[in-house]
């Protein structure tokens, strides 16, 4: 259903290998949960750009072990992610029909309609946005 490909200046991204219907489960992947006392160490590694906030109060982190960890950010995403703590997974669901070969994007802020700036520069909407740092999971994701 999905494949990894080049996404121009954004590096790698995830693309639909075939048409995906609105509401379809694109992927469900396991996570490794990082306890809050280890976050300071995680933030000092390259993985600090790839984790989702996790757990009660969003004080832990989750490293996604699936291809969708390479989903790029958009303020007009065609997919959303859902944290499933009981199963230690994250699900990716289509927000609308996605055409074959179209890049699959999510809003790193968690809420697909959220316009809060993310922690890296974007050029969406024609305006360069620099932002405060946040992490995925109803806060944000990192550049994937």
Image (cartoon, rainbow, N blue to C red):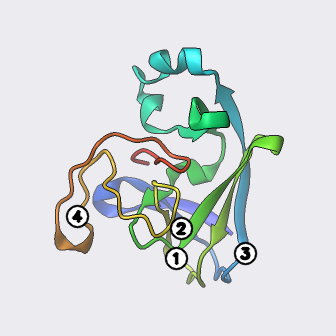
**Distance of label 4 from label 3 (alpha carbons):** 28 Å
Is the residue marked by circle 4 packed among few (<14), some (14-19), or many (20+) residues within 10 Å? few
- Of residues 55 and 70, the one nearer the viewer is 55
Q: Specify the farthest residue to the front.
A: 57
Which one is earlier in the sequence, the residue at label 1 or at label 3? 3
Estimate the x, y position of residue 35 in percent, counting from the top left: 63, 21
- Tell me, yes or no, whether the two marked residues, 2 and 1, touch with CB atoms within 8 Å: yes
- Nearer the N terminus, badge 2 or badge 4? 2
Mark 3 highlights which residue?
24
How many residues crowd mark 1 within 10 Å: few (<14), some (14–19), many (20+)? Answer: some
In whole angstroms, how far apart are the C-alphas of marks 1 and 3? 16 Å
Q: Position of residue 45 (x, y in %)?
A: 42, 22
Determine whether the residue tagged by mark 1 lies in a helix, strand or loop: loop
- Helix, strand or loop status at disc 4: loop
What kind of element bears circle 3? loop
* Circle 4 residue: 123
Separation of marks 2 and 4 at Cα, in angstroms:
20 Å
Dot 3 or dot 2, earlier in sequence: 2
Is residue 143 among the parts visible in the rendering? yes
Q: Which mark is residue 101?
A: 1
Residue occupying image coordinates x 82% and y 43%: 87
Give above or below for 94 relative to 65.
below
Would you identify the image quadrant in which residue 132 lies? top left
- In this picture, residue 138 sits left or right of residue 55: left
């Amino acid at each position: 259903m999905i494949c990894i490909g080049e996404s121009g200046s954004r590096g790698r991204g995830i693309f639909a290998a075939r048409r995906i219907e609105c509401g379809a489960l694109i992927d469900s992947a396991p996570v490794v949960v990082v306890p809050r006392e280890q976050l300071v160490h995680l933030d000092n590694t390259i993985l600090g750009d790839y984790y989702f906030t996790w757990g009660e109060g969003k004080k832990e982190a989750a490293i996604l072990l699936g291809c969708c960890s390479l989903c790029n950010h958009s303020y007009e995403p065609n997919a959303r992610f859902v944290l499933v703590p009981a199963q230690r997974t994250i699900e990716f669901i289509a927000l609308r029909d996605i055409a074959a070969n179209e890049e699959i994007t999510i809003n790193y802020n968690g809420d697909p309609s959220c316009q809060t700036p993310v922690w890296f520069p974007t050029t969406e909407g024609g305006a360069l946005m620099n932002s405060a740092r946040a992490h995925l999971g109803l806060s944000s994701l990192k550049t994937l």
